Amino acid sequence: MQTNKSKTASSKLLKSINQQRVLRLIFTEGPITRVELAEKTGLTQQTITNIVNRLLQDDVLQELNPVASNGGRKPVPLMVKSENLYAIGVEIAVRYVRGTLMDFRRRPVKEIVVDVPVYNNDEHPVLYIRQVVDELLGHVTHRNQLKGIGCSIQGLVDSKRGVVIYSPGLRWRQFPLQERLEAAYGLPVYLENDANLLALVENLNGRLADSPNNLTIKLDYGIGGAIVANGQLLAGMRHVAGEFGHYKAFDGEDARQCHCGAKGCLTTFASASGLKRNGGYTPEELKQALEADEPEAVRLFGKVEAAVGRAIGNVITILNPNHVLLTGKMIDVLGERLIPALNRRIMETVPESCREVELVYLPRTPDESSSAVGLVMNHFFDVPLDKFSI
């Protein structure tokens, strides 16, 4: 039996969930009227009015000019005041820390890059992060409009606990970065692996916004991936779901040793670092050699394309996504040749029941500090269904 205290807590949480549902809908589909909000959410007109009034009072929404109607009072469209909401995104890399201050319309205010000669210990990256954030804060006019700090990290991240599980280049193992930064700035801080982060941003208001089930695969210096099912990012038991780079794609003499300890991983040839280490080409060098129709380059490209295509095809067959999004250094440089070849191979190899999948790509890998701003935005508009229980 629920106590009065637990009923009150559940009521408050339900109220919060409803408000977030409405706020997210206004952000993703605005301008939108109160009547349309009620129709799309199933909430009563009075509930919608109460929520909208609270958000207007908090200066999060704005009302636009009334629109024509078939009689009666003209509906008033609503939009989020995206230009008055800000976030800081930080990309923490091995050789630099990049920070971006941006509004929720994704217009940059200030970007800062600090070069890093070497990280001497696990505290050293924090010093660089704080140097970047401190300078960006000097460009924030009203501190209450700053809604958080997002961090993009190449490594294993437990985003729920705010802990970097393992990132050898940053000398972090089980490092409580979220706790450290929240204590320093009194702002919400969010961490995410770079591939998961890209997927979150693209699912919120990017190429995957209308795709409930999708894969994001980043063919970069390493290879990362993210899985979204029914609109939710799948992290896995140990937060390593989507580690697409360790799909076993090569055998025989091509089964080279991977840094993970196994052999034959996709990353050993299909990442920019693996291509150079085991194939002898940078992506740019391979592109030039392909344009010159050099036999060795053609053979190597064919091997990489076949392995990536088979791997993606097999994952599509298992997960049956609506879309697969490709990005990263390999796509930046080789995408014009690689994407059509992958599309053909995938459509030839997946079952007919999975052929409605659409392969999409970003012609340029997004700035990760800008993507980290999207992480703050995603949490700001998040609907906390996982916290609600009856």
Image (cartoon, rainbow, N blue to C red):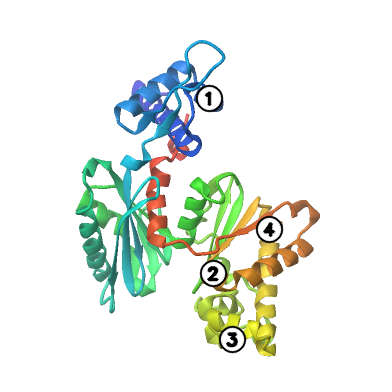
At label 1, the amino acid type is Glu
Select label 3 or label 4 by which is in front. Answer: 3
Q: Which mark is residue 332?
A: 2
- The residue to which callout 1 is attached is 36
- The residue to which callout 4 is attached is 316
Element marked by disc 1: helix
Q: Is residue 214 above or below residue 118?
A: above
Element marked by disc 4: helix
Q: CA distance from mark 4 to mark 1?
A: 36 Å
Q: CA distance from mark 2 to mark 3?
A: 19 Å
Q: CA distance from mark 3 to mark 4?
A: 27 Å
Q: Are marks 3 and 4 in contact (CB under 8 Å)?
A: no
At label 3, the amino acid type is Gly
At label 4, the amino acid type is Ile
Q: Is residue 257 left or right of residue 173?
A: right
Local crowd size for mark 4, using a 10 Å CA cut-off: few (<14), some (14–19), many (≥20) = many
Q: Residue at x 55, y 73 (%)?
A: 333
At label 2, the amino acid type is Asp
Q: Earlier in the sequence, mark 4 or mark 1?
A: 1
Camera-side residue: 195 or 362? 362
Q: Quadrant of residue 167?
A: bottom left
Local crowd size for mark 2, using a 10 Å CA cut-off: few (<14), some (14–19), many (≥20) = some
Q: Is residue 269 above or below residue 2?
A: below
